[in-house]
Image (tube, rainbow, N blue to C red):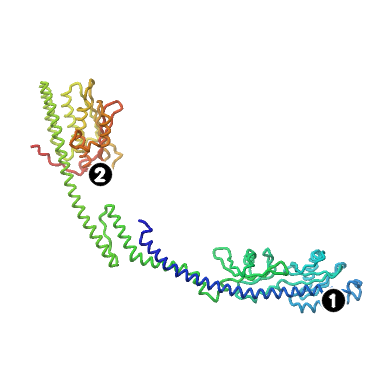
């Protein structure tokens, strides 16, 4: 059945075309609402982040100006260059510088430490609000690198990123003169304030990262989230990004970020979308449930239609297919729908009428075939009788009275046996008795010129066949193959049982063959016989062959057949194949003898 033309396909397509615009509109509405929420949340957080970055950068720039002004405005730092290292005035000046640095740390709220480094004497003056030893170690360890960066004439405003044990820091160093360097240190955690961001929840947060994605500040983000941030740093030019974790249960995030102008780092905020949308759970659930809802509605509609329409229709179609295969024992149950109930009952009534009609036609066909079979049986007997009288007439003309007497005796035996020809079927042994009497009669006519051989399997003699099945071919062999011969003419008849074709109603295939050593079939005649053209003119010269072939067809159908060929050494060969059946398997009873008048 063509699926595209089926009612099921058309209904699914129609329902889909109706529902699809509605679901698409609903889906678009929810997607648009979520986009508005993303835009608003991202704008709010971007404003907070920009404000935080602006404040940080302003403090760093002011610190830069502060450090650059130390060599010009601070007399104590200027005087250290001229004082003797370790003298009392040197120590007093350092103390005043320390006090000034401690005061200024309070003014520059992000600055963790100010320091002054004496490169000639490797002396470090450090004022810090944190752990003194750790900060001193970080500054001393990074001073050689900082001094190398200041070897040129131009001092850059950027801050360097340094690592100090368990924390990262920004360091800015300026050169006061050939001996002294001043600088400031900022703890990265002071630059990262995640409390001000909207919708970060427990699974979001802010972080400061390097261009290669390494975290510089402490953060509430886990390692996987920081790695996710590192993979999307190239998209910070966009107002925001919607990114997803890898895996089957991927969580989506809203990511906003701003690169720093004062150092090689970026400020990034990562917001879980499910926390960001916690005030809009309806939209989130609708987006997830839309495909499921569509599928549920479609499946539910199909289920009801299956029960009400498709199932009864499929039962009706299956019933029609069974009827088309010849199965008439079909009766469908009436469905609940009144319309389909009427169709189903009409179908059942139609099948009953077809059954009755088929039975009537079959019975009429049996009667016709039985009458035709009997007519064919009766037709072949006069044909043989006429030929027998011709033989007696020929012998009497030759005044061979003894042969006429012998012929009459054999003919009497033959006619006595032929009384069984009125039966529906006879055994192979009975058919061979007919053939033997016939050939004995022919031998009396052609002494020393005709001989025959009967080779019959002992297991094949009790199988039945229509009477006078073999004799027309033996008669034709003598008439047509015995022409203009000087050597003896031999007819060889064989009967074999092929058990390979055994079935419930037969024991195999009975293979009969009539061969002679005569002139054989002419090529054009052999072609006609092999094509079955003897059946086109039942009243013509091949009446005997047509009679046998038609009787086999009427009785056995395609299970029986005739083949014609010429032997390799000359002569003709006719093969007859028919089912090997006993009288019980054949199922027929003996017909009444033909009334011979």
Nearest to the observer: residue 203 or residue 298: 298
Marks 2 and 1: in contact by CB < 8 Å? no
- Looking at the rendered structure, which numbered label has been put on residue 505? 2
Q: Percent position (x, y) of residue 431? A: 19, 34
Decide if residue 424 is on the left or right side of residue 32.
left
Structural distance between the alpha carbons of marks 1 and 2: 128 Å
Secondary structure of the residue carrying tag 2 is loop
- In the picture of the structure, the residue carrying the numbered disc 1 is 73
Q: Percent position (x, y) of residue 512? A: 25, 34
Secondary structure of the residue carrying tag 1 is helix
443, above or below 63, in the image: above
The crowding category of the residue bearing disc 1, from other C-alpha atoms within 10 Å (few below 14, some 14 to 19, many at least 20), is few
* Quarter of the rendering containing residue 322: bottom left
Decide if residue 101 is on the left or right side of residue 233.
right
Q: Earlier in the sequence, mark 1 or mark 2?
A: 1
Nearest to the observer: residue 469 or residue 3: 3
* Quarter of the rendering containing residue 52: bottom right
């Amino acid at each position: 059945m063509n699926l595209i033309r089926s009612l099921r396909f058309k209904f699914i397509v129609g329902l889909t075309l109706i529902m699809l615009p509605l679901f698409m509109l609903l889906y678009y509405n929810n997607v648009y609402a979520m986009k508005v929420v993303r835009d608003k949340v991202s704008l709010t957080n971007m404003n907070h982040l920009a404000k935080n970055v602006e404040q940080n950068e302003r403090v760093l720039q002011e610190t830069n100006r502060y450090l650059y002004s130390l060599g010009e405005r601070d007399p104590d730092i200027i005087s250290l260059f001229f004082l003797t290292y370790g003298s009392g005035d040197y120590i007093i000046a350092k103390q005043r510088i320390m006090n000034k640095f401690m005061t200024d740390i309070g003014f520059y709220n992000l600055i963790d430490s100010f320091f002054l480094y004496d490169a000639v004497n490797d002396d470090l003056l450090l004022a810090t609000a944190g752990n003194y030893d750790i900060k001193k170690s970080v500054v001393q360890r990074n001073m050689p690198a900082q001094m190398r960066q200041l070897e040129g004439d131009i001092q850059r405003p950027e801050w360097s990123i340094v690592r100090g044990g368990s924390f990262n820091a920004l360091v800015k160093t300026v050169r006061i003169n050939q001996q002294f360097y001043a600088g400031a240190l900022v703890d990265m955690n002071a630059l990262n304030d995640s409390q001000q961001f909207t919708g970060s929840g427990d699974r979001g947060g802010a972080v400061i990262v390097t261009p290669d994605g390494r975290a510089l500040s402490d953060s509430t983000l886990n390692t996987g989230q920081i790695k996710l941030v590192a993979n999307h740093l190239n998209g910070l030019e966009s107002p925001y990004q919607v990114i997803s974790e890898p895996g089957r249960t991927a969580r989506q995030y809203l990511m906003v970020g701003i690169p720093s102008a004062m150092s090689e780092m970026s400020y990034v905020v990562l917001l879980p979308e499910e926390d960001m949308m916690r005030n809009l759970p309806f939209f989130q659930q609708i987006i997830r449930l839309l495909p499921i809802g569509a599928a549920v509605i479609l499946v539910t509609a199909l289920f009801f239609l299956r029960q009400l329409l498709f199932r009864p229709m499929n039962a009706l179609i299956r019933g029609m297919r069974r009827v088309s295969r010849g199965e008439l024992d079909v009766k469908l149950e009436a469905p609940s729908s009144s319309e389909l109930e009427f169709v189903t009952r009409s179908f059942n009534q139609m099948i009953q009428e077809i059954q009755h009609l088929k039975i009537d036609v079959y019975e009429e066909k049996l009667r016709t075939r039985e009458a035709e079979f009997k007519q064919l049986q009766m037709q072949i007997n006069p044909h043989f009788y006429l030929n027998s009288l011709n033989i007696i007439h020929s012998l009497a003309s030759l005044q061979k009275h003894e042969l006429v007497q012998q012929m009459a005796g054999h003919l009497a035996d033959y006619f006595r046996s032929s009384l069984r020809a009125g039966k529906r079927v006879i055994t192979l042994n009975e058919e061979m008795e007919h053939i033997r009497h016939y050939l004995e009669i022919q031998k009396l006519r052609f002494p020393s010129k005709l001989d025959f051989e009967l080779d019959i399997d002992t297991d094949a003699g009790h199988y039945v066949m229509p009477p006078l099945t073999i004799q027309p071919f033996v008669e034709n062999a003598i008439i047509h193959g015995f022409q203009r011969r000087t050597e003896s003419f031999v007819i060889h008849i064989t009967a074999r049982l092929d058990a390979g074709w055994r079935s419930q109603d037969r024991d195999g295939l009975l293979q009969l063959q009539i061969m002679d050593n005569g002139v054989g079939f002419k090529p054009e005649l052999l072609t006609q016989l092999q094509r079955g053209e003897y059946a086109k003119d039942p009243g013509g010269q091949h009446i005997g062959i047509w009679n046998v072939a038609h009787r086999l067809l009427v009785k056995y159908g395609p299970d029986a057949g005739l083949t014609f060929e010429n032997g390799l050494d000359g002569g003709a060969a006719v093969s007859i194949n028919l089912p090997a059946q006993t009288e019980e398997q054949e199922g027929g009873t003996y017909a009444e003898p033909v009334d011979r008048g």
